[in-house]
Amino acid sequence: MWKYYALLSALFAALTAIFAKIGVKNINSDLATAIRTCVILLITWGIVFAGNQINGIKELTRGNWLFLVLSGVATGLSWLFYFKALQLGEASKVVPIDKLSVVFTVILSFIILKEPFSWKVLLGVGLIASGSIVLLIGK
């Protein structure tokens, strides 16, 4: 089932890039990110309340809070840089380079989470990295 969620995530990420590229035209990219973040905030808290999941907040540990806050900081910085890159560059080039996050994630998951590598993961990461490098060095 996780594969379907991952594919839906990829589809909505693609729509995010296209809508964001159109949305940042002639406005400050930081303002655009703040507006987008407010929309996400409303949607996600709406889902939590609608699903009566708010009681789960009592079960969070200090570690949960720490790493969720760090994840939020990383997400916020990622979005700020992503929107600035989309504003200044072509979506067809920015988005594939942004997907170097996949390469970084695999490397960090091996180092920090001690997740195993397989030949398929290494091949996929190598192809993603190669494509991103081509776009980075190309004009």
Image (cartoon, rainbow, N blue to C red):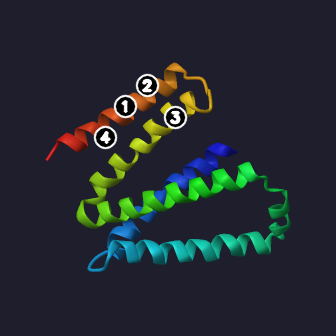
The residue indicated by pointer 4 is 132
| Disc 2, SS | helix
- Label 2 to label 1, Cα distance in Å? 6 Å
Dot 1, how many residues are within 10 Å of its Cα: few (below 14), some (14-19), or many (20+)? few
| Residue that badge 3 annotates | 108
Q: Residues within 10 Å of mark 4 (few under 14, many from 20)?
A: many
Q: Helix, strand or loop at disc 3? A: helix
Q: Is residue 122 above or below residue 138?
A: above
**Given this view, does label 3 or label 2 mark the residue nearer the observer?**
3
Towards the viewer: 57 or 27? 57
| Residue projecting furthest to the left | 139
| Contact (Cβ within 8 Å) of mark 3 with mark 2 | no
Q: Earlier in the sequence, mark 1 or mark 4?
A: 1
Asked whether, in this view, residue 91 is left or right of residue 42, the answer is left
Q: Which residue is mark 1?
A: 127
The residue where tag 2 is placed is 123
Instruction: Give the CA separation, mark 4 to mark 2.
Output: 14 Å
Q: Position of residue 52 (x, y in %)?
A: 84, 70
Residue contact between numbered discs 2 and 1, judged by CB atoms under 8 Å:
yes
> Mark 2 is on which residue type?
Leu
Q: Position of residue 60 (x, y in %)?
A: 79, 56
